[in-house]
Image: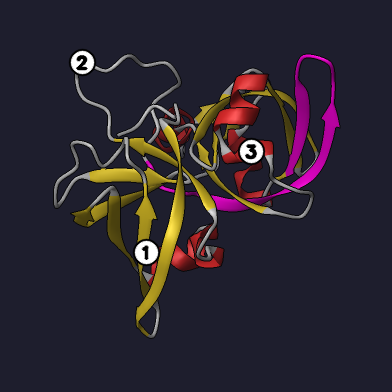
Amino acid sequence: MFTGIVEELGEVVGVTPTAEDSSLVAVRGPLVTSDARHGDSIAVNGVCLTVVEVDGGVFTADVMGETLRRSALGALRTGDRVNLERAATLGSRLGGHLVQGHVDGVGEVLSREPAPRWETVRFRLPAALSRYVVEKGSITVDGVSLTVAEVGDGWFAVGLIPTTLSATTLGNRSVGDPVNLEMDVLAKYVERLLAGRTVDGAEVPA
Protein backbone atom coordinates (compact mmCIF):
# COMPACT_ATOMS: atom_id res chain seq x y z
CA MET A 1 0.00 0.00 0.00
CA PHE A 2 1.17 3.54 -0.83
CA THR A 3 -0.02 7.10 -0.24
CA GLY A 4 0.70 8.75 -3.59
CA ILE A 5 3.33 11.08 -2.14
CA VAL A 6 6.41 10.78 -4.35
CA GLU A 7 9.64 10.47 -2.36
CA GLU A 8 12.12 11.07 -5.15
CA LEU A 9 12.63 11.25 -8.89
CA GLY A 10 14.54 8.20 -9.99
CA GLU A 11 16.22 7.36 -13.28
CA VAL A 12 15.86 4.24 -15.39
CA VAL A 13 19.37 2.87 -15.95
CA GLY A 14 18.44 -0.29 -17.82
CA VAL A 15 15.57 -2.21 -19.40
CA THR A 16 16.43 -5.81 -20.25
CA PRO A 17 13.92 -8.17 -21.90
CA THR A 18 13.95 -11.46 -19.98
CA ALA A 19 11.32 -13.35 -21.96
CA GLU A 20 8.85 -12.80 -24.74
CA ASP A 21 6.61 -10.59 -22.61
CA SER A 22 8.60 -9.52 -19.53
CA SER A 23 11.53 -7.28 -18.66
CA LEU A 24 14.02 -6.60 -15.88
CA VAL A 25 14.01 -2.88 -15.09
CA ALA A 26 16.86 -1.20 -13.20
CA VAL A 27 16.19 2.15 -11.52
CA ARG A 28 18.53 4.51 -9.68
CA GLY A 29 16.97 5.89 -6.50
CA PRO A 30 19.36 6.63 -3.61
CA LEU A 31 16.58 7.47 -1.14
CA VAL A 32 14.22 4.56 -1.77
CA THR A 33 17.10 2.07 -1.85
CA SER A 34 18.62 3.34 1.43
CA ASP A 35 16.70 0.71 3.37
CA ALA A 36 15.41 -1.52 0.56
CA ARG A 37 15.83 -5.27 0.62
CA HIS A 38 14.97 -8.16 -1.66
CA GLY A 39 11.18 -8.59 -1.74
CA ASP A 40 10.30 -5.01 -0.75
CA SER A 41 7.73 -3.03 -2.72
CA ILE A 42 8.52 0.23 -4.51
CA ALA A 43 6.05 2.10 -6.68
CA VAL A 44 7.50 3.18 -10.04
CA ASN A 45 5.23 5.72 -11.74
CA GLY A 46 2.44 4.32 -9.63
CA VAL A 47 3.08 0.65 -10.38
CA CYS A 48 3.92 -1.56 -7.40
CA LEU A 49 7.08 -3.50 -8.23
CA THR A 50 8.95 -6.05 -6.13
CA VAL A 51 12.65 -5.46 -5.54
CA VAL A 52 14.81 -8.28 -6.87
CA GLU A 53 18.22 -6.80 -6.08
CA VAL A 54 19.77 -3.63 -4.66
CA ASP A 55 23.26 -2.51 -5.66
CA GLY A 56 24.80 0.91 -5.04
CA GLY A 57 21.61 2.94 -5.04
CA VAL A 58 20.10 0.99 -7.95
CA PHE A 59 17.31 -1.53 -7.58
CA THR A 60 16.06 -4.01 -10.14
CA ALA A 61 12.55 -5.39 -10.53
CA ASP A 62 10.87 -7.94 -12.77
CA VAL A 63 8.02 -6.47 -14.82
CA MET A 64 5.61 -9.08 -16.16
CA GLY A 65 3.86 -8.91 -19.51
CA GLU A 66 0.51 -8.17 -17.85
CA THR A 67 2.03 -5.08 -16.21
CA LEU A 68 3.71 -3.96 -19.42
CA ARG A 69 0.42 -4.24 -21.32
CA ARG A 70 -1.81 -2.57 -18.73
CA SER A 71 0.48 0.31 -17.78
CA ALA A 72 2.81 2.81 -19.39
CA LEU A 73 5.89 0.99 -18.06
CA GLY A 74 6.22 -0.77 -21.40
CA ALA A 75 7.33 2.56 -22.89
CA LEU A 76 10.16 3.11 -20.39
CA ARG A 77 13.62 3.67 -21.84
CA THR A 78 17.07 4.13 -20.30
CA GLY A 79 17.43 7.70 -19.03
CA ASP A 80 13.72 8.23 -18.31
CA ARG A 81 12.84 9.88 -15.00
CA VAL A 82 10.31 8.05 -12.84
CA ASN A 83 8.33 8.77 -9.67
CA LEU A 84 9.38 6.56 -6.75
CA GLU A 85 7.67 5.78 -3.46
CA ARG A 86 8.38 3.11 -0.89
CA ALA A 87 5.48 1.12 0.56
CA ALA A 88 3.78 2.81 3.51
CA THR A 89 4.19 1.51 7.05
CA LEU A 90 1.55 1.49 9.80
CA GLY A 91 3.16 4.61 11.26
CA SER A 92 3.24 6.55 7.98
CA ARG A 93 1.48 9.87 7.55
CA LEU A 94 -1.35 9.58 5.03
CA GLY A 95 -0.49 12.75 3.12
CA GLY A 96 -2.27 11.63 -0.05
CA HIS A 97 -4.83 8.82 -0.14
CA LEU A 98 -4.78 5.02 -0.07
CA VAL A 99 -3.01 3.85 -3.23
CA GLN A 100 -2.55 0.18 -4.11
CA GLY A 101 -0.04 0.51 -6.92
CA HIS A 102 -2.40 -1.45 -9.19
CA VAL A 103 -2.88 0.53 -12.40
CA ASP A 104 -6.45 0.55 -13.76
CA GLY A 105 -5.61 2.00 -17.15
CA VAL A 106 -3.49 4.34 -19.20
CA GLY A 107 -4.51 7.95 -19.80
CA GLU A 108 -2.99 10.66 -21.96
CA VAL A 109 -2.02 14.30 -21.42
CA LEU A 110 -4.50 16.41 -23.40
CA SER A 111 -3.47 19.96 -22.50
CA ARG A 112 -1.48 22.14 -20.12
CA GLU A 113 -2.54 25.62 -19.00
CA PRO A 114 0.16 27.48 -17.02
CA ALA A 115 -0.87 30.06 -14.42
CA PRO A 116 1.22 32.26 -12.08
CA ARG A 117 0.98 29.90 -9.09
CA TRP A 118 -0.12 26.57 -10.55
CA GLU A 119 -0.75 24.71 -13.77
CA THR A 120 -3.96 23.04 -14.90
CA VAL A 121 -3.37 19.76 -16.71
CA ARG A 122 -6.09 17.86 -18.52
CA PHE A 123 -5.91 14.10 -19.10
CA ARG A 124 -7.82 11.76 -21.40
CA LEU A 125 -9.64 9.07 -19.44
CA PRO A 126 -10.54 5.56 -20.68
CA ALA A 127 -14.33 5.31 -20.97
CA ALA A 128 -14.52 2.30 -18.64
CA LEU A 129 -12.95 4.32 -15.80
CA SER A 130 -15.04 7.50 -16.10
CA ARG A 131 -17.61 6.37 -13.53
CA TYR A 132 -14.98 6.32 -10.78
CA VAL A 133 -13.91 9.95 -11.21
CA VAL A 134 -15.74 12.73 -9.38
CA GLU A 135 -14.97 16.40 -8.85
CA LYS A 136 -12.91 16.92 -5.66
CA GLY A 137 -12.30 13.18 -5.46
CA SER A 138 -8.90 11.48 -5.42
CA ILE A 139 -7.04 9.95 -8.37
CA THR A 140 -3.49 8.69 -8.84
CA VAL A 141 -1.58 9.79 -11.95
CA ASP A 142 1.85 8.18 -12.44
CA GLY A 143 1.90 7.45 -8.72
CA VAL A 144 1.00 10.99 -7.64
CA SER A 145 -2.05 11.47 -5.41
CA LEU A 146 -4.11 14.30 -6.90
CA THR A 147 -7.47 15.97 -6.36
CA VAL A 148 -9.77 16.11 -9.38
CA ALA A 149 -10.58 19.73 -10.20
CA GLU A 150 -12.96 19.17 -13.10
CA VAL A 151 -14.52 16.25 -14.96
CA GLY A 152 -15.79 16.19 -18.56
CA ASP A 153 -16.78 13.69 -21.21
CA GLY A 154 -13.78 11.37 -21.40
CA TRP A 155 -11.39 13.64 -19.50
CA PHE A 156 -10.52 15.10 -16.11
CA ALA A 157 -8.35 18.01 -15.00
CA VAL A 158 -6.10 18.62 -11.99
CA GLY A 159 -4.27 21.63 -10.64
CA LEU A 160 -0.54 21.11 -10.05
CA ILE A 161 1.30 23.31 -7.55
CA PRO A 162 4.98 24.26 -8.05
CA THR A 163 6.18 21.53 -5.66
CA THR A 164 4.40 18.81 -7.65
CA LEU A 165 5.69 20.24 -10.93
CA SER A 166 9.29 20.22 -9.73
CA ALA A 167 9.32 17.05 -7.60
CA THR A 168 7.52 14.65 -9.96
CA THR A 169 7.53 13.69 -13.62
CA LEU A 170 4.24 15.54 -14.12
CA GLY A 171 6.21 18.76 -14.48
CA ASN A 172 7.64 17.67 -17.83
CA ARG A 173 4.92 15.47 -19.28
CA SER A 174 4.04 16.70 -22.78
CA VAL A 175 0.72 16.63 -24.63
CA GLY A 176 0.24 13.11 -25.96
CA ASP A 177 2.36 11.42 -23.28
CA PRO A 178 0.83 8.31 -21.64
CA VAL A 179 0.27 8.23 -17.87
CA ASN A 180 -0.68 5.48 -15.43
CA LEU A 181 -4.07 5.92 -13.76
CA GLU A 182 -5.32 4.31 -10.57
CA MET A 183 -8.85 5.03 -9.41
CA ASP A 184 -9.79 5.48 -5.76
CA VAL A 185 -10.21 1.92 -4.47
CA LEU A 186 -13.09 3.02 -2.20
CA ALA A 187 -15.19 3.87 -5.26
CA LYS A 188 -14.63 0.40 -6.69
CA TYR A 189 -15.62 -1.31 -3.43
CA VAL A 190 -18.78 0.78 -3.16
CA GLU A 191 -19.72 -0.13 -6.74
CA ARG A 192 -19.18 -3.82 -6.01
CA LEU A 193 -21.23 -3.73 -2.80
CA LEU A 194 -24.13 -1.98 -4.51
CA ALA A 195 -24.14 -4.21 -7.60
CA GLY A 196 -27.54 -5.82 -8.11
CA ARG A 197 -29.30 -3.53 -5.65
CA THR A 198 -31.90 -0.97 -6.65
CA VAL A 199 -31.75 2.78 -6.15
CA ASP A 200 -34.95 4.72 -6.81
CA GLY A 201 -36.31 1.68 -8.63
CA ALA A 202 -33.30 1.28 -10.93
CA GLU A 203 -30.85 -1.58 -10.61
CA VAL A 204 -27.24 -0.59 -9.92
CA PRO A 205 -25.04 -2.13 -12.67
CA ALA A 206 -22.22 -4.51 -11.75
Q: Is residue 56 above or below residue 89?
A: below
Give the camera-side residue of 199 and 105: 105
Residue 184: percent from left, percent from top: 48, 31
Marking on residue 25: 1
What residue would you read off at disc 3? 170
Tell me which label, 3 or 2, sits earlier in the chain. 2
Q: Is residue 1 left or right of residue 144?
A: left
The CA span between labels 3 and 2 is 28 Å
Tell me which label, 1 or 2, sits earlier in the chain. 1
* Residue type at numbered disc 1: Val
* Residue type at numbered disc 2: Gly
Q: Is residue 196 magenta?
A: no
Q: Quadrant of residue 95?
A: top left
Measuring 75% from the left and 19% from the top, which residue is drawn there?
A: 118
Measuring 30% from the left and 38% from the top, which residue is drawn there?
A: 32
Residue 65: percent from left, percent from top: 40, 72
